[in-house]
Image: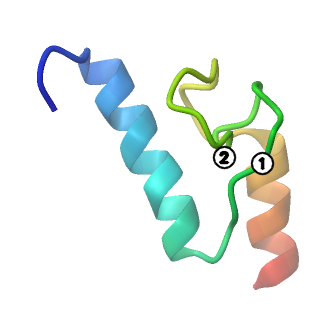
Amino acid sequence: MGTRSSEDNVATIIHEMGHVLGLRDIYNKNSIMHFNDGGYARKVTKDANDAVVNKY
């Protein structure tokens, strides 16, 4: 993962775990599930949490 910060690496892992749980990428830059690595979220966001709760 090169020169990325630990915070960025954790955010990527959380994002990818969202995919494992069945979530899709979205266009909201404030969501952990934003499709672009340049998103602002660095922790589980309410929309992602709600999506997992509704799914399971």
Find the distance from the CA under tag 1 to the CA under tag 2. Answer: 6 Å
Position in image of residue 52 (x %, y %): 74, 69
Along the polypeptide, which appears first: circle 1 or circle 2? 1
Q: Decide: is 28 above or below 15.
A: above
Q: What residue do we see at 16% from left, 32% from top?
A: 1
Classify residue 26 as left or right of residue 3. Answer: right
Classify residue 32 as left or right of residue 30. Answer: left
Report which residue position mark 1 lands on. 26
Q: What residue do we see at 80% from left, 71% from top?
A: 53
Q: Residue furthest left?
A: 2
Three-letter amino acid code of the residue under disc 1: Ile
Determine the secondary structure under disc 1.
loop
Q: Are marks 1 and 2 in contact (CB under 8 Å)?
A: yes
**Numbered label attached to residue 42:** none
Position in image of residue 41 (x %, y %): 63, 25
Determine the secondary structure under disc 2.
loop
Position in image of residue 20 (x %, y %): 49, 74
Task: Please identify the quadrant where the C terminus is shown.
Answer: bottom right
| Total numbered circles | 2
Report which residue position mark 2 lands on. 33
**Which of 35 and 19 lies nearest the eye of the viewer?**
35
Classify residue 17 as left or right of residue 8. Answer: right
Q: Decide: is 7 above or below 54.
A: above
> Dot 1: few (<14), some (14–19), or many (≥20) neighbours within 10 Å?
some
Q: Decide: is 38 above or below 1.
A: above
Q: Which of pointers 1 and 2 indicates the residue nearer the eye? A: 1
**Which of 50 and 23 lies nearest the eye of the viewer?**
23
Q: What residue do we see at 73% from left, 39% from top?
A: 45
Position in image of residue 39 (x %, y %): 62, 24
Q: Quadrant of residue 34?
A: top right
Three-letter amino acid code of the residue under disc 2: Met
> Dot 2: few (<14), some (14–19), or many (≥20) neighbours within 10 Å?
many
